[in-house]
Amino acid sequence: MFGRFKYSDEVFYGEVSNGIVNSHDSDGKTYELEDLELLPPSIPTKIVCVGLNYHDHAVELGMRVPEEPVLFLKPTSALIGHGGKINYPRSSKKVDYEAELAVIIGKRCKNISYERASDVIAGFTCFNDVTARDLQNRDGQWTRSKSFDTFAPVGPFIVPAEDFETDDAPIKTRVNGEIRQDSNISNLIFDVPYLIEFISGIMTLEVGDIIATGTPPGVGELNPGDLVEVEIEGIGILGNEVA
């Protein structure tokens, strides 16, 4: 696994193993993980999100399975890392969590075929598509509700593509230790290669870009003081408090 870290005024990428971080910088310094601030592990030019992409979520909502992916964007200003605070906006009275598998793009690409999709993936991590649900319902479109600063927690680390199997991985959300979402990546309607083919046919994907692949059933409300954790087996736990 690798991630992006801050120590004092120094920001760097590093390899994580058994609580130790080995810097990718030329100096090759070694740090204790507990001494570092965890930053978003990717610096994307855009965050591309997919709506209604789990079979069991469609059943929960009583909605028909879409014929093609429903896309929207989140701004990079919404990014925070593991341990960062989710700020509850004053303009909203209902903020929800949405656990998601995130794909990190490793090569600049356009019009990538399904068969070649794995060639452009750097790895995978956890994502929380925090949403002001009342504003989403009021606006009739999603930009304001999805775009507040801190509404895109991502991390904690990136697992290389060759070390993670997207066909079968449990995904869960816990709020204050209570399980709220419990599904499996295998329930995706449009799998990762399909999403890369579809999205790269629309827009050029740059190194570090994030594709958030959709959320399973069990989406629910957050309140100030809550600790929300997104866990994907084989990746880890992304934890953030609500302020």
Image (tube, grey):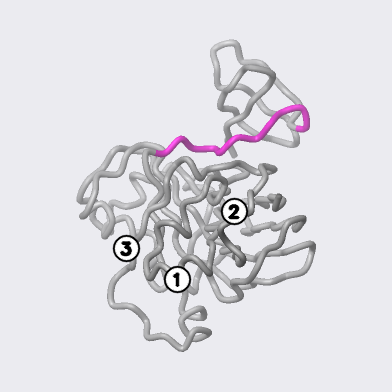
Magenta residues (range): 34-44
Q: Which residue is mark 1?
A: 138
Does the stretch in magenta take in 222?
no
SS class of the residue under badge 3? helix
Q: Would you place residue 195 above or below residue 77 in this image? A: below
The residue most toward the bottom is 62
Query: How far, Cα to Cα, is label 2 from label 3?
Result: 35 Å
Left or right of 238, for residue 184: left
Q: Amino acid at mark 3?
A: Tyr
Q: Which residue is mark 3?
A: 194
Q: Amino acid at mark 1?
A: Arg
User: Image quarter for residue 191?
Assistant: bottom left
Left or right of 45, for residue 18: right
SS class of the residue under badge 2? loop
Among numbered discs 2 and 3, the one appearing first in the sequence: 2
Among numbered discs 1 and 2, the one appearing first in the sequence: 2
Position of the N terminus by quadrant: top right
